[in-house]
Amino acid sequence: MYTSHEDIGYDFEDVPKDKKTLKSHPNIDGGWAWMMVLSSFFVHILIMGSQMALGVLNVEWLEEFHQSRGLTAWVSSLSMGITLIVGPFIGLFINTCGCRGTAIIGGLVNSLGWVLSAYAANLHYLFITFGVTAGFGSGMAYLPAVVMVGRYFQKRRALAQGLSTTGTGFGTFLMTVLLKYLCAEYGWRNAMFIQGAVSLNLCVCGALMRPLSPGKEGKDPAGRDPQVPPAHSTESVKSSGQLGRADEKEGSPGREETLGDLADQACPEEAGHRRNMCAFRMLKMVSQLTLRVRKGFQEWYSGYFGAASLFTNRVFVAFIFWALFAYSSFVIPFIHLPEIVNLYNLSEQNDIFPLTSIIAIVHIFGKVILGIVADLPCISVWNVFLMANFTLVLSIFLLPLMHTYASLAVICALIGFSSGYFSLMPVVTEDLVGIEHLANAYGIIICANGISALLGPPFAGWIYDITQKYDFSFYICGLLYLVGILFLLIQPCIQIIEQSRKKCMGGTQV
């Protein structure tokens, strides 16, 4: 899906009959690969962490603009939803600009969205600046961080992805504290301006996403870096029209007369020649960029629309259905819990240790522990995945029944731990579709999660506007989430029955 001229993880040796042997790159599973994990870790802190802490700003926006909770929640949900929904389309940028360029541009756009939002005169202005602009920039920086970790790791890919995604938990804790402090000291507008400056660190993270060189050691047999062209190659000299100058530097005797004639030419002619060469270079650059964009679009188009066979897999379709309802149950508490504790008169206790921070901290341990358990040879990844989902659903149903800080803290800890199954999603997706379709399939799942994050918080806000309670929103989202899990359980059973029936029919025919 995201293969570009930059992101090459392997090189090939020529063998008879045009067959190719895959040869591992020295940086795979080691070396600079761990810098990719560090870069992705900080991207998760800056993007996912700050988005999970938006409940702090949601309270400020309610007081500032005096709009309904459903309408106000759209600001946060747009940012979170667009970050994930644009995932499949960001592949086009990655194919064209590479992961490094895409992440750097995304960091700039995300920072611009935060800064412009500081000057918001109304809520609709925030929809554009923060929801769309900052959300799109987040998507451009987030997806390359996930893709590059996958490119740099083979054997320890699950461990690397798990370590990098723990940045979400750390980021939620840190960003919640940071935003609360900035809002209290400087107001929410200045807090968003400062956060925009902090988001520029995404450009630094993007700069660390060094593309893998195609060579075994990053050099050709002559010991030169393949990305650096020879000093005076025939092709480069011909294309630039500087053959005479190159020979002059090398002192070539065969060109002395020609160089002498060139020196005697009038200045206007030389200036015209330079202008022509500059125009030629610009034309060549535009032509190369056009070809690059066209090739990137073709790769992106074939990667997604060539994967139509994915939708013939009914278990994968059930998995998409599950993803449409799963993420909202995780996102809604982050957006609305700060206001829920205000309604329960628990603000003083929550200020000491926010409930969202409890979810974030336990979420880190949940990812690590569930990943370790799922890697055990006697344990099925699917069983761990489903048990964690059932625990999360149970926690969502119990949350509205808790009205004390201690009971809410226990439920939030359960939500944080059980939501650690997110680190298992790539493994589960691979089990469903195979490694060859993993990238395309996971992009679709992320997009479904984005739709869930986009609609979940506004839905909870609308339910409150109608009923003056958040309880029913948790019950409805939990029920839909449970239906998605049950659908996941039913489809494999149907497949097993159909396979056994085909075997029986085949045996009868024989």
Image (cartoon, rainbow, N blue to C red):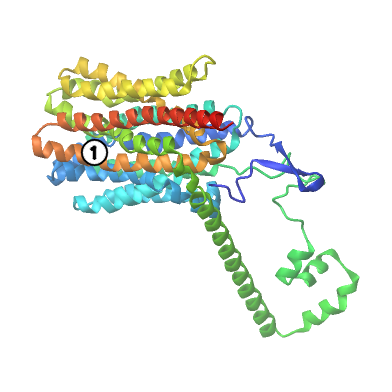
Q: Nearer the viewer, residue 500 or 87?
A: 500
Q: Secondary structure at mark 1?
A: helix
Question: Residue drawn at (47%, 41%), measured in percent from left and top?
Answer: 441
Q: Nearer the viewer, residue 172 or 365?
A: 365
Tag count: 1
Looking at this view, name the residue that lies furthest to the right.
Answer: 253
Tell me which residue sits at (38%, 38%) in the image. Answer: 320
Q: Is residue 153 left or right of residue 474?
A: right
Where residue 245 sits, quadrant-wise, is bottom right
Residue 164 placed where, x, y %? Answer: 48, 30
* Image coords of residue 218 (percent x, y): 71, 42
- Residue 172 image offset from top left, x and y in percent: 34, 30
The one of 155 and 194 positioned closer to us in this rendering: 155
Q: Residues within 10 Å of mark 1 (few under 14, many from 20)?
A: many
Q: Which residue is mark 1?
A: 457
Q: Horizontal and vertical percent for residue 442?
A: 46, 39
**One can see residue 256 in this view:** yes
Query: Label 1 is placed on what type of residue?
Result: Pro
Furthest residue toward front: 509
Q: Is residue 296 above or below residue 44?
A: below
Quarter of image, res 337: top left
For the point 54% across and 44% down, the residue is 207
Is residue 202 depicted above or below 418 in this figure? Answer: below
